[in-house]
Image: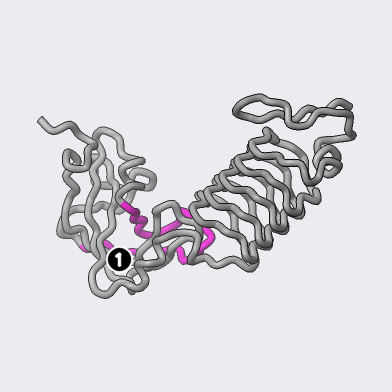
Amino acid sequence: MKIEIRGWRNQEVIICGKYESIKDCLQKNKGKSLQGADLQGANLRGADLRGADLRGANLWGANLWGADLQGADLQGANLQGADLRGANLRGADLQGADLRGADLQGADLQGADLQGADLQGANLWGAKNFNKYTTTPLYGMLDQPGKIIAYKIVNNRNEGIYNGGLVYTIGATIEEKGADTNEFKNCGEGINLATLDWCMREWKPGYKILLAEFTKEDIACIPVGSDGKFRVYRCRIIGEKNLKESGLLEAK
């Protein structure tokens, strides 16, 4: 059948011809640059894509289960929701790649460059040979002496915006001994705190951003690939962020 692969931004034809499938097309054109190619939802299960140039390619929702992507250049690629279970990503360049919601269970990430990659909601359960400390800057909190300050976004009832129950008032010490310590779970039970930029992205009129104080010993879990959220066993609410100074409300 006729297969045509175009750039997903400029619609320029990259490959055109008769092939059995997209997988067959890519493997018969191995070595040809696929930079910016639109491969959304493509079935590439088990494909040999070693060293492929997939910079900026759109692989949203693609089936890459068991694919060999060793040494592939995936800088800036869109891999949202892609199935990468058991994929060989050894030495792959994933700088700036969008891996939100991607399934990386059992994937081999030895030597993969994850700098700047967005791993929000990615499933890294059982993924091998990767350094979790490269997936989020939050691990730096574990080296901080003394008190640390992070942020808690709450609604007009001073409850968390996703799960109610706990009330966060200034001066109160909040404790949750049963906080979820599973570092492969992005959002779990416990006191979920975040960076200021994360809270600002989630903010809506009527919400408040509170300042929470804790120590490194209070940290229950920093999820692998976190985009800014983490969990603590306890914290003390010490104040409220000035939303006008933060640019969320207009100063009068």
Q: Which residues are magenta?
A: 173-195
State the residue position of label 1.
Answer: 234
Quadrant containing the C terminus in the rendered view: top left
Q: Residue furthest left?
A: 252
Identity of the residue drawn at 89% across and 29% down? 18
Graded by Cα atoms within 10 Å as few (under 14), some (14 to 19) or many (20 or more), the crowding at tag 1 reads many
190 drawn magenta:
yes
Classify residue 239 as left or right of residue 179.
Answer: left
Classify residue 235 as left or right of residue 30.
Answer: left
- Residue 166, percent from left and from top: 30, 53
Give the quadrant of residue 206. Answer: top left
Identity of the residue drawn at 23% across and 63% down? 213
Q: Nearer the viewer, residue 210 or 49?
A: 49
60 drawn magenta:
no
In the image, residue 80 sits, relative to residue 143, either above or below, namely above
Q: Which amino acid, by three-letter code, is at mark 1?
A: Arg
In the image, residue 80 sits, relative to residue 144, either above or below, namely above
What type of secondary structure mainly makes up the magenta span? loop
- Residue 99, percent from left and from top: 57, 47
Identity of the residue drawn at 62% across and 65% down? 111
Classify residue 97 as left or right of residue 151.
Answer: right
In the image, residue 74 sits, relative to residue 92, either above or below, namely above
Kind of element beneath mark 1: strand
In the image, residue 71 sits, relative to residue 45, either above or below, namely below
